[in-house]
Image (spheres, grey):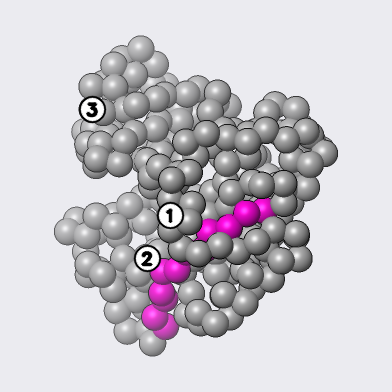
Amino acid sequence: MSGHSKWSTIKRKKGAEDAKRSKIFSRIVKEIHVAVREGGPDPDSNPRLRLAVQNAKGANMPKDNVQRAISKAGSDAENYEEVTFEGYAPHGIAVYVECLTDNNNRTVGNIRSIFTRSGGSLGTNGSLNFLFETKGVFTVPKKDIDPDEFELEIIDAGAEEIEDEDGMFIITTQLDDFGNVQKKLEEMNIEAENAELQRIPNSTNKLDKELAVKVIKVIEEFEDNDDVQSVYHNLEITDEIIAAVNE
């Protein structure tokens, strides 16, 4: 089972336990703001906004909140900037952080501080590009889906990998096939709980359980920052580490 899917499993379990719904909503609102600024307020003609609205629904975000975010984006003075950071957490684990911020100086200072305090190091943009590949990842509730028929349809649409985890299908696609798989799901009237482009590690680094848990705590510190949208890493996640994190 691939490392990125293991990490998404941890995030789903911990997200439910820690009741981080408000933080999830906040990140979706920021994404809606950027999407509207880029392509307008109509999801039908704005793919990025359509995806943000879909993810809002998957996160059970109330429709009124979504509409309010879309309306506010057209007039709000807040202007979020997309910034990324690349570096190494302790023990040589590569970390890629994606942010949306209205204060770049604040965000740079906070992210640098987390790297430094944890014993890691902040690198230059582009320094980790060779370690990660951008791919599409869909999280689809199994519900009453016929798995055999579903897999045939999705593979034909361009799915590269399909994994069965905790009542979910985790579908991975090449970047160029992301839109094709999204369209196929719509044609099949299947709603993904989440659909996004993720930076998937080309290979993973293995640490013993104790060190791995310490690195995951650093990754969670990044994720808890209000300016951070996504965090990617190349730590190999095992069932033993998942159990230790969820203790």
Whether residue 247 sits left or right of residue 71 in the image: it is right
Residue 27 placement (x, y as % from top left): 50, 63
Q: Mark 2 points at which residue?
A: 32
94 vs 182, nearest the viewer: 94
Image quadrant containing the N terminus: top right
Q: The disc labelled 2 sits on which kind of residue?
A: Ile
Of all residues, the one furthest to the left in this rendering is: 45
Q: How far apart are marks 1 and 3 (CA)?
A: 24 Å
Q: Tell me if residue 88 is in the magenta stretch.
A: yes
CB contact under 8 Å: marks 2 and 1? yes
In this rendering, does residue 217 appear at all? Answer: yes
Q: Residues within 10 Å of mark 2 (few under 14, many from 20)?
A: many
- Count of picture labels: 3
Residue 60 position, x and y percent, is 49, 51
Q: Which of marks 2 and 1 is in front?
A: 2
Boundaries of the magenta span = 78-89
Of the residues tagged 1 and 3, which is closer to the observer? 3
The disc at residue 157 is: 3
- Mark 2 or 3, nearer chain start: 2
Residue annotated with mark 1 = 56
Percent across and percent down for residue 12 are 60, 41
Amino acid residing under circle 3? Ala
Residue shown at 35% from the left, 69% from the top: 34
